[in-house]
Image: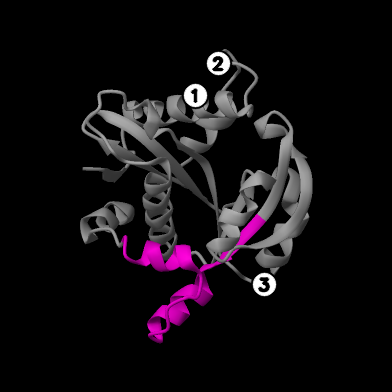
């Protein structure tokens, strides 16, 4: 059974960094396994960051990090500062999802039948609930254009055009944003959001004990 938890120890954060590095090398976001991973570890270790792990026993198959906006800004400010400034000036509370990596296929002991999409859905559900718990109004994503359809099915809208992203080996990137305030408002009014993935994530509500850790 998959367990979702917040990374709180050095070992857990190092495991998340290692998984992100492996997936990024495979996807071409890092040139090689020997590349400097400071851009990964720096964000996971930020005090404004919440990193969620997807584990089965001792096996880590997925991770995702949410960075809350602060005076230091967000990772995507490197190329999308102008696009984010409009939302900041409007008084919105932003957070960015980054270091999203899933590789359940590495689970080679034959005991797991979980798929990467299943784990991705669980991780996104948890990070969205974490963002809502932190009063985030808009969740930001810097994505590869090949994943645009997936994020649109979540209800994300594009806020920035295609640019080269130096943090991922200058791969092409698009800026997307999810309006959490609108989603929460709809749910509170008893109206489920129309987007299929959000409906599925709503059924993934994490236990209250998961949220308790966010306020510590």
- Tell me the residue that label 3 is attached to: 90
In this rendered view, identify the residue nearer to me: 159 or 137: 159
Which residues make up the magenta segment? 176-204
Q: CA distance from mark 2 to mark 1?
A: 7 Å
Q: Quadrant of residue 86?
A: bottom right
Which mark identifies residue 33?
2
Q: Left or right? Give the position of 104 relative to 91.
A: left
Evaluate if marks 2 and 3 touch, with contact meaning CB atoms under 8 Å apart.
no
Location of residue 156 in the rendering, given as x and y in whole percent from the top left corner: 59, 63
Q: Are marks 2 and 1 in contact (CB under 8 Å)?
A: yes
Q: Could you tell which of marks 1 and 3 lies nearer the N-terminus?
A: 1
| Relative image position of residue 2 (x, y in whole percent) | 26, 43
Dot 1 falls on a residue whose secondary structure is helix
Which residue bears the numbered disc 1?
Answer: 22
Extreme residue in the top direction: 34
Up the image or down, 46 lies above or below 150; here it is: above
Which of these two is toward me, 33 or 209?
A: 33
């Amino acid at each position: 059974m998959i367990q979702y938890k917040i990374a709180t120890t050095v070992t857990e954060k190092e495991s998340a960094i290692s998984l992100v590095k492996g997936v990024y090398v495979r996807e071409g976001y890092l040139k090689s396994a020997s590349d400097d991973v400071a851009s990964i570890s720096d964000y996971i270790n930020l005090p404004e960051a919440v990193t969620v792990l997807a584990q089965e026993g001792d096996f880590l198959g997925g991770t995702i990090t949410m960075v809350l906006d602060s005076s230091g800004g967000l990772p995507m400010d490197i190329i999308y500062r102008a696009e984010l400034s409009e939302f900041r000036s409007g008084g919105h509370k932003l957070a960015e999802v980054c270091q999203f990596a899933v590789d359940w296929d590495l689970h080679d002991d034959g005991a797991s039948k979980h798929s990467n999409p299943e784990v991705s859905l669980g991780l996104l559900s948890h990070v969205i609930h974490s963002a809502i718990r932190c009063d985030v109004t808009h969740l930001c994503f810097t994505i590869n254009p090949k994943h645009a359809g997936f994020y649109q099915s979540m209800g994300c809208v594009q806020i920035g055009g295609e640019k080269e992203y130096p943090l991922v080996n200058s791969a092409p990137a698009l800026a997307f944003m999810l309006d959490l305030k609108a989603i929460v408002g709809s749910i509170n009014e008893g109206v489920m959001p129309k987007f299929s993935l959000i409906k599925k994530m709503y059924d993934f509500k994490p236990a209250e004990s998961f949220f308790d850790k966010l306020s510590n």
